[in-house]
Each structure stands twice: as C-alpha cells, then as structure tokens.
Image (cartoon, rainbow, N blue to C red):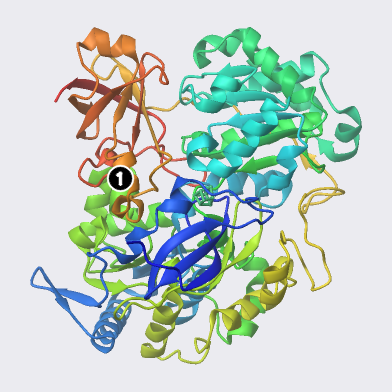
C-alpha cells in the first residue's frame, strides 16, 4: 500500500525552465508523492514530469558509494580514497601539462551555489578558466545574441505576462511538451483570444491552434525572420516612437533586409510569402506581442544570428520594455540559466560579468590572481582533448557522451583523457564508457540551495529526504576536493546559504535576493538590494548597454548539412513530454510506461514511399553514423523531414548528428542532419 506521507517539503521542480513550485511528501526517508504548490510560477499546476517522475530517487541502481576504476573494473572506495586519488592525479597533470589541461563542467541540475563553487574551484584551485556547462549546447546562442544587442542575456519578460500579451510568436519551441505549464498558459491565452504565430517545421499542438503556422524548412530561420522584418518596414508596421528614441541603424538595416522580401525567400524557407506577411502583421498589430523561442532557434550554424534576427523584430515593433512583450528564451532545464549565470562560462564570472571588468573585485574577494589565459568552452575542451592538450575533465550532472552531438567526435575526445571524473546519481553513459572516478551526488530532493528559472526568478530547493548511502551534495564534494588541494580556506562554507551570501556580495543584480526574501516573495532579478521589488520586465526605460540598441543586419549562411541523393531527408532532434534529456532520471520512473522508447517520426507519404510500417525498426544513416529506431508514422512532420528524441542510451541518436556548430558560440547543430532511412 502507498506510504503515508510523514512530512511535506516545498521545493522547485528540477526538470524544465518553468521552475514550478511543488510540495514533496516523504515517508521512511523516501519521496512518496509530489503535489503542485499554489505559487505565482505555476499556479497550482505541474506536468507529468514534475508530478510523477520522482521514483528515480530510490532506483535500485542509484550509485551511493564513490568508485574508482582500476584495470577496467569499478571498485568501491571511501570518500578519502576517492578524493585523494583525484587530488593526486590532478596535481600530477597540472605539474606536467599546466592548469589548462583540466576542464570543469557545471550543471543545470546543480544549484546556483554549486555552480558558483564549481567555477570558483576551476579558477582559484586549478588556476584555469576552462569551465563551462550544458548551456553551451542549448541557449548560449540566446545569451550571446541578447547580450550583444540588448546588454543582458536573460529573458526580457516574466511568465505572468502570458495573460496580458495580445499575441505570441513561438519560434523553434514546443512548450506543450518541453515547458508544459507555460505551454498550457499560452494555450489558455490563445483560447481566450490572443493571436498566435508558430514557427516550427512540425505541426505541434500549439501549431494546430495558430493563426499562422510557418512550417519552415529546418535551417532557414535567418531568411524567414529577415523577411518578416522586410514586411514590417515595407508595410509601415513599426513603432515609430520606440524607433526614434531607442533604436539605431534603421536606414542601413532597411536597405539590407529589402533583399529578403517574402516573395524572394519563401521558396528557400518552404513557406508561403502570404503567410510570412500575415505573421508579421499579427506580431506588429497586437499592441504587445510576446516572443518565446527554444532550441529550434539556437541549435544551428546560425543559432546566435538567428536569435539576433528575432530581436530585430522586437526592436522594429517596440515589443521590448513593456508588459506582455519581450524576447524570451525558454530554457530547457530549470537551472540552465543559473549554471551559466553563476560563472560556469569560460569568459564570464558570476552574474555574467566579464573577467576584464569584474576580475579585480573577484580577486580581492577570493584572495587570488585570476587565471590569465582564455578559458575553453565545452566544445573547445572536446577539441583540446582530441588534440591531447586537455588531460582531465570533471563533469557533474551531465551525461556529455550521450547528449553531445556527433557520438564519434565525442568518443574520440573522451577517450583521449587521462582522468574523467563523473559526479551523478547513476553510472551514466559517460561514466560507463570513459569514467575514471565516480562520485555519488545527492539529488535535488536531498539538498538545499537555489535554482534560477527561465523568467529570472530565483527560487529555493529544500531537502525532503536524506541522500542515500554515502552520496553527498555537489557543494560538499567540491569543497572537500578543494580542501584536499590546499584550498580549505575559501571553500569552508557550512551551508548553501553561506555560499549564496558570497554570491550576492559579488553579483550586483542578485544582492537583494536573500534566502529570507525568496522564501516569502517570488522575485525576478535584477534585484540589487533588499528593498528592491525585483524586475519582472527588463528594458523599461533603457537597455543595460545604454538608451539605444542597434538593429543587426544578418546575412543568411546555409548549413553544409544538405540533402542529396544519398541522404534525401532532414532529421531534427528534440525532447518529448515524458522524458528529460539523457533520460538519467525520467528513464527510471513510470514515465517509461507512457513513452517506452525514442522513435523516428516520419510523414505518412514518406513511409508509404519507402514501404515502411508504423512501429517497425528502421535504420537511419547520416554522413556521420547509423542508429536503429522504431518508426512512428505521424502527420506532425512534413514529407522530407524526420524527428527523433534522444533520451534512450541503447538507441543513441547522437550517432547521427553532425559536427556543425554555431558560428559564434559553437552550440552544435542538433536541428539539421541529412539522413536516409531503410528497413532495420
Ligand atoms: Fe513544471 Fe517544467 Fe517541472 Fe513540468 S517539468 S512540473 S512544467 S518545472
């Protein structure tokens, strides 16, 4: 019979960037139920992941003891043995190859405090800026584009604005499956009368409701949004007052985008010129239009530049700096915003402060000299590992082998390392194939701290049950290793709250977010002092970079991943409602009964032409590798295109994806791979 709850603990769902608040019931040291909290973030709702996907916490294969691999076999070790082993190896590697031979990867599944400590460890203890996180492969292009044009990489508006927006422009995002509580709020708003434009190759649930669905050819975001800008200018759908006061570069931009008139680009984009015009009219004519975008915008050769073309639309129409508007990246994992914001980024310190600007303040606070060399990001670390320059990697809460694009390239990189430290709940694929040491981590049900969701709310997580066996929170592990390496001072925090107070002292925009306040109030940063009410809407009177922002003329650069006779179909990869990223957690819950496997989604016409039947195994070949998946015939995808999720290690969809990367920040191009399909 179900256990009777003994205690209920308020915490934050770890899964997606919505950051729902929930109450966790525990009994006998186990999580036994989850129910939604009536909180401004989620208003009494949770999705099937937050509500039901908690049984991983007590899965029988949870690793609860440190392990060291010797002669190919994992052997249990004490914390002392494991930490001494790592410290000795790191000292030897640094003595021989220098501190830049080591890399550290933070995690969206770890708290802000833990990510702060991870980057401090890299910079202070190891002496390298080689620190990054999984934001690199998802929304670093958003952060780069937003910061370059508007001065901050964060979402402009808050989720509460969904109820007041007159229209939505959803670009490369499927919130119904990936941010379900936000997806439901958008759906409700549309059913109440808000207009909706969906830009997505697939006919998603929200696309079914849309006034205009631009089912573009994957890889053509830039010409499509340039064409919408051309319509806005040609038809005078502009906010002239906003342009006059707050935007520069209009004349040059207008001349540039004239070459992208809808009638010129519609064919390349695979949509009609009339629909592009209709979409532009809806976006400009709503009074306030809220743009949400996802990885369908960012995981491309022109990911960063694609987001810049979206920002152009907001600048032209004045859809910035007011409620119900904004450019709003929907982050895929709850704390992906926080991991980068805390400084798990080779070029920036906590609060996304540039090393060249804020370095002296951090040096004074930390009592050290910051490393002088440029750090490597995740993709550069993989390149350096393949070249023999990176020798050691410490990754926590991140199965890089399964989830990075192009399995062959990742394998070559990880195989070249002398020391791979994996810190997680389970022996993930990275640990199984390449791990040297495994450190058992506490889950978010088992520790305290804060997370930062997509709309810039900082929210508490609270331990509901104790960690099993010898598992420890990431913050404890980082501090213990720092102590082993002679840095006990500076890593002697007795609680996450003490770490957070150091974060607040170094991050001006977060200074007002004390534990006491965020327990009482739902606060969005910037919140620079304890009396500040927080900032639900950015850019109201000026941009962080100044009064004005410049329009960005962005030319189209087609991806090299093109179809031909051998590889005639385009594959896009993504997630499903029931599972989360590498499946490490949701794959060990009853959600597997709802969705037992990844599938290859194919249009009925293509399946008929290839003589393939729904459910049969098919072999997918790309120029980079082969994978076998069950076929799912669905009208959600267009003829000539395919869609696959990547949650199942046994299917390993990233054997197919390419080595193409965003031109500016190197996020892999998960969204366009040319393939062919045959009976498996
Ligand atoms: Fe909320 Fe996202 Fe968790 Fe679902 S996965 S409960 S939408 S935070």
Q: Residue at x 66, y 45 (%)?
A: 146
In this view, 92 is above or below 636? below
In this view, 160 is above or below 71? above
Expressed as whole percent of the image width and height from the top left, the position of residue 601 reads 33, 25
Q: Residue at x 54, y 37 (%)?
A: 175
Mark 1 neighbour class, 10 Å CA radius: few under 14, some 14 to 19, many 20 or more: some
What residue would you read off at disc 1?
Answer: 592
Left/right placement of residue 416 relative to residue 336 reads left
Q: Across the whole image, how many numbered discs are drawn on residues?
A: 1
Q: Is residue 108 visible?
A: no
The secondary structure type at the circle numbered 1 is helix
Location of residue 27 (image quadrant): bottom left
Q: Dividing the image into 4 quarters, which one contains the N terminus?
A: bottom left
Left/right placement of residue 640 relative to residue 435 reads right
In this view, 96 is above or below 525? below
Looking at the picture, tell me which residue is in the foreground, 568 or 160.
160
Q: Dividing the image into 4 quarters, which one contains the C terminus?
A: top left
Expressed as whole percent of the image width and height from the top left, the position of residue 585 reads 35, 56
């Amino acid at each position: 019979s179900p256990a009777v709850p003994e205690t209920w603990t308020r915490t934050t769902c770890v899964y997606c960037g919505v950051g729902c608040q929930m109450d966790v019931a525990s009994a006998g040291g186990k999580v036994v139920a989850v129910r939604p909290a009536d909180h401004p973030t989620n208003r009494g709702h949770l999705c099937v992941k937050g509500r039901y996907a908690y049984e991983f916490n007590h899965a029988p294969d949870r690793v609860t003891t440190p392990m060291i691999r010797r002669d190919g076999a994992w052997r249990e070790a004490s914390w002392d043995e494991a930490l001494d082993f790592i410290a000795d190896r790191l000292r030897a590697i640094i003595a021989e190859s220098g501190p830049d031979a080591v890399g550290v990867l933070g995690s969206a599944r770890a708290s802000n405090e833990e990510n702060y400590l991870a980057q401090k460890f890299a910079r202070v203890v190891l002496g390298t800026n080689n620190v990054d996180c999984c934001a690199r492969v998802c929304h670093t292009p958003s952060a780069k584009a937003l910061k370059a044009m508007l001065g901050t990489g964060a979402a402009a508006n808050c989720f509460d604005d969904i109820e007041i927006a007159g229209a939505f422009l959803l670009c490369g995002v499927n919130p119904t499956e990936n941010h379900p509580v936000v997806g439901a709020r958008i759906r409700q708003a549309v059913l109440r009368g808000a207009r909706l434009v969906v830009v997505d190759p697939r006919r998603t649930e929200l696309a079914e409701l849309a006034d205009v669905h631009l089912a573009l050819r994957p890889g053509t975001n830039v010409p499509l949004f340039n064409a919408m800008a051309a319509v806005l200018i040609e038809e005078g759908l502009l906010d002239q007052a906003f342009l006059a006061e707050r935007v520069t570069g209009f004349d040059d931009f207008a001349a540039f985008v004239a070459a992208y008139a809808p009638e010129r680009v519609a064919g390349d984009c695979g949509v009609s010129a009339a629909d592009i015009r209709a979409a532009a009219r809806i976006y400009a004519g709503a009074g306030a239009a809220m743009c949400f975008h996802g990885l369908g915008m960012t995981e491309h050769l022109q990911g960063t530049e694609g987001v810049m073309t979206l920002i152009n639309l907001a600048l032209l129409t004045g859809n910035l700096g007011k409620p119900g508007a904004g450019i709003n990246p929907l982050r895929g994992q709850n704390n992906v915003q926080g991991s980068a914001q805390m400084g798990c980024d080779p070029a920036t310190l906590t609060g996304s402060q540039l090393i060249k600007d804020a370095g002296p303040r951090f040096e004074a606070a930390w009592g050290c000299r910051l490393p002088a060399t440029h750090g490597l990001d995740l993709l550069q670390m993989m390149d350096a590992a393949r070249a023999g320059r990176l020798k050691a990697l410490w990754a926590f809460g991140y199965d890089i082998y399964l989830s990075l694009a192009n399995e062959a390239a990742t394998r070559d990189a990880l195989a070249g390392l002398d020391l791979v430290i994996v810190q997680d709940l389970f022996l993930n694929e990275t640990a199984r194939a390449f791990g040297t040491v495994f450190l058992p981590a506490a889950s978010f049900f088992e520790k305290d701290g804060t997370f930062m969701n997509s709309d810039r709310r900082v929210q508490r997580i609270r331990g509901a049950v104790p960690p099993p066996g010898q598992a420890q929170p990431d913050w404890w592990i980082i501090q213990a290793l720092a102590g082993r390496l002679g840095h006990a001072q500076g890593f002697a925090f007795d609680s996450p709250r003490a770490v957070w107070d150091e974060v607040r002292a170094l991050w001006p925009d977060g200074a007002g977010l004390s534990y006491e306040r965020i327990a009482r109030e739902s606060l969005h940063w910037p919140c620079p002092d304890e009396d500040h009410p927080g900032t639900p809407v950015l850019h109201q009177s000026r941009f962080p970079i100044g009064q004005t922002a410049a329009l960005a003329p962005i030319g189209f650069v087609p991806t090299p991943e093109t179809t031909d006779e051998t590889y005639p179909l385009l594959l896009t990869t993504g997630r499903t409602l029931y599972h989360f990223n590498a499946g490490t957690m949701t794959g060990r819950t009853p959600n597997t009964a709802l969705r037992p496997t990844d599938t290859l989604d194919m249009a009925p016409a293509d399946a008929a032409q290839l003589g393939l039947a729904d459910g049969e195994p098919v072999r997918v070949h790309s120029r980079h590798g082969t994978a076998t998946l069950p076929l799912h015939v669905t009208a959600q995808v267009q003829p000539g295109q395919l869609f696959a999720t990547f949650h199942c290690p046994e299917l390993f969809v990233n054997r197919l994806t390419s080595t193409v990367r965003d031109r500016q920040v190197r996020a892999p191009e998960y969204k366009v791979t040319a393939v062919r399909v045959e009976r498996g």
